[in-house]
Amino acid sequence: MATPLPAADAADLVTIKEIVALLRPTPYPVSDSKVRRLIERYSIPVSRRRGKCCVSFTDILEAHRDEADRLHASS
C-alpha cells in the first residue's frame, strides 16, 4: 500500500502571483516564469483553489534558497 504524501497546510498555500509579490522586496526577487521553473525542477505539488494554481510557500522558499545557494557556489 502506498503512503500518501502529506498535504500542505491551507494557510501555507499561495498563488504564483502572491509569491512574486512576497519576494519582490527581497534581495532575490523572482518572476512568474522563475517560480514555474522552481515548481517543475523541485517537483513541488500544485493544487487548484478557486481556479488558481497554488503551492506551499514553504516549499517555494526552500527551493528558492537552494537555487540561490547553487548559483552562488558556481560563481
Image (cartoon, rainbow, N blue to C red):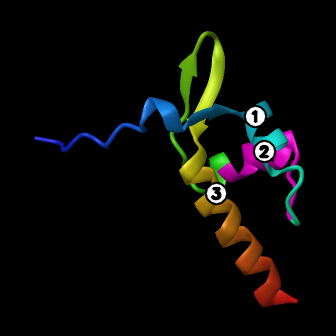
**Does residue 30 show up magenta in the picture?**
yes
Relative to 47, say whether 50 is above or below: above
What secondary structure predominates along the stretch shown in magenta?
helix
Residue 12, horizontal then vertical, whole percent: 52, 38
User: Which residues fall within the magenta stretch?
Assistant: 28-38
User: Mark 2 highlights which residue?
Assistant: 22
Q: Amino acid at mark 1?
A: Glu
Q: Which mark is residue 64?
A: none
Determine the CA span between mark 1 and mark 3. 13 Å
Asked if the residue under mark 2 is in contact with the one under mark 1, i.e. CB atoms within 8 Å, the reply is yes
**Does residue 50 show up magenta in the picture?**
no
| Residue at the spot 82% in from the left edge and 42% down from the top edge | 20
Q: Which mark is residue 18?
A: 1
Q: Is residue 35 left or right of residue 29?
A: left
| Residue at the spot 10% in from the left edge and 41% down from the top edge | 1
User: Mark 3 highlights which residue?
Assistant: 61
Give whichever of discs 1 and 3 has the lower sequence position: 1
